[in-house]
Image (spheres, rainbow, N blue to C red):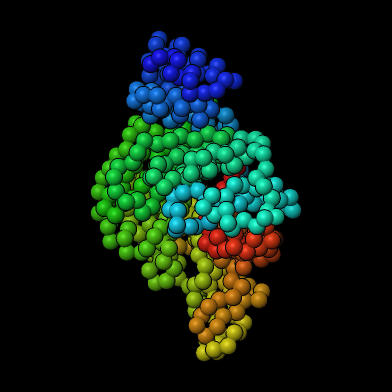
Amino acid sequence: MAPEAIVQLVDGGEEEEAQRKVVVVQQHLDDNIMSTILSKLPSEPAHRFAVVSKSSGALLRQPAFLQNHLSSRRSLVQLLKDDELPSMVAIQPKDHQRPGGYVHLTIVNNANPTNPVSLHLPVHHAYQHLIAEHAPAASPAEGELATFLMRTIPKLDASFVASDGPMLLARNPTRSYFVCYPAANRWIALPPPPAGDTVAAGFRYVVVDAASGTISFMVVLVAPDHVATFSSKTGEWGVKEHGAHEDVMAFGAWGPGIRAGNSIYWQSAAGDARARVLCFDVARGGRVSAFREPPLADGGTKRVGRSLGSASGRLRLCAFDVRDNDPGNVQLHAVEGVHGVFFLDDGDAGTWRRAHEVVVRDDISVTFFGVPHGAEVPVDFTGASGSSIIVNKNQVLFRRDLEGGNKVRLFDLNKQYDPRMARLYNNLDMFPLF
């Protein structure tokens, strides 16, 4: 590979110097050492280097690169040691017009809601008509997290589909997958996955060496008849039939991948009697199965909100049920709402334990047709606090305490955006940011 071909990919500055050094030494070092050197580069120049030829691209599929690149800036080990909770969360609209593509993100200060995040993230050009003329322009990116959110993820044209701790899995419309560490503005583009429709995507990582921060990760793509797994230990995709076609296809679309313990979980879009949780069990050799969600609260007549997440490394499901003492009333009338927080029993997959129940009577009503007004729809995510949940009430996000029942306003989508833009968030997913 000619050095000139590499240097032409970048325009001066520190990147050019780093690229020149890599090219100078590549003829004298094996692929493993070269991959280690590339892992020290910022993600964008490292991936520019990889597109020059097949041989250079193979360097980014070596375990030395895959297991060192993401953790080379900020220690993932320290986050685990401190049991750190996410200081911010990203809410992402669910949009079926651009499956897998970037649409928009809103960042919420979870730790200190009185100090809102000042980042105004770009909107995909297909949705520019939703932005009011007085809306603030995208502010300059400062810091690695800001750069990742404002420049990197829109440039990749990707949306988040799974998370584990501070790392996220993203996908773009061409079925390219990226393992991302937003706090360091680091990302890895995975090789193309095997052919087949993916109905659920998940991700997990473990720390291999605490001293160096080396990690090992796995990406899981569930298709109707098989499951494809990518391992950073091999740099390759593996495929095997899962034998759970009926479970995978019978319950509608699946939500973001949630890692808890040795498994990855997904929640079905269907919230009626078909509501299920899909499980990929790493400890059982990648066994795929589905099981029912927890039952309604005592006296509950309808479940109007549900969300899957994890707290303290355990899978939890947050549900909001309605108790209607006058179900025959055709007029708009007040009802009770019940927040139920359930944890999956460690010893028996599919068995739920109710950990909290909070009764809500704050301006909640239904009509004869069961249409709720003022419901607090839970929005959970991987690595959430075990003492509280986040809920969405009429496009306003609150954090509700599970012990005292008090709630704190986090973010008002109606005030932040034009009504058309706010409606883009009628359905949303939430992901942690550290």
On the picture, is 379 further left or further right than 215?
Answer: right
Q: Which residue sits at x=39%, y=11%?
A: 27
User: Which of the 4 quarters of the picture holds residue 151?
Assistant: top right
Q: Which residue sits at x=45%, y=39%?
A: 178
- Residue 56 in view (yes/no): yes
**Labels in figure, total:** 0
The quadrant the C terminus occupies is: top right
On the picture, is 276 further left or further right than 77?
Answer: left
Q: Which residue sits at x=56%, y=85%?
A: 325
Q: Is residue 352 above or below residue 193?
A: below
On the picture, is 192 further left or further right than 357?
Answer: left
Q: Position of residue 32 (x, y in %)?
A: 39, 20
On the picture, is 2 further left or further right than 334?
Answer: left
Q: Position of residue 271 (x, y in %)?
A: 44, 68
Q: Nearer the viewer, residue 370 or 95?
A: 95
Q: Which residue sits at x=53%, y=43%?
A: 154
Check the image and name the residue furthest to the right: 114
- Residue 341 in view (yes/no): no
Q: Position of residue 71 (x, y in %)?
A: 52, 31
The quadrant the N terminus occupies is: top left
Q: Position of residue 341 (x, y in %)?
A: 54, 63
Q: Is residue 306 above or below residue 143?
A: below
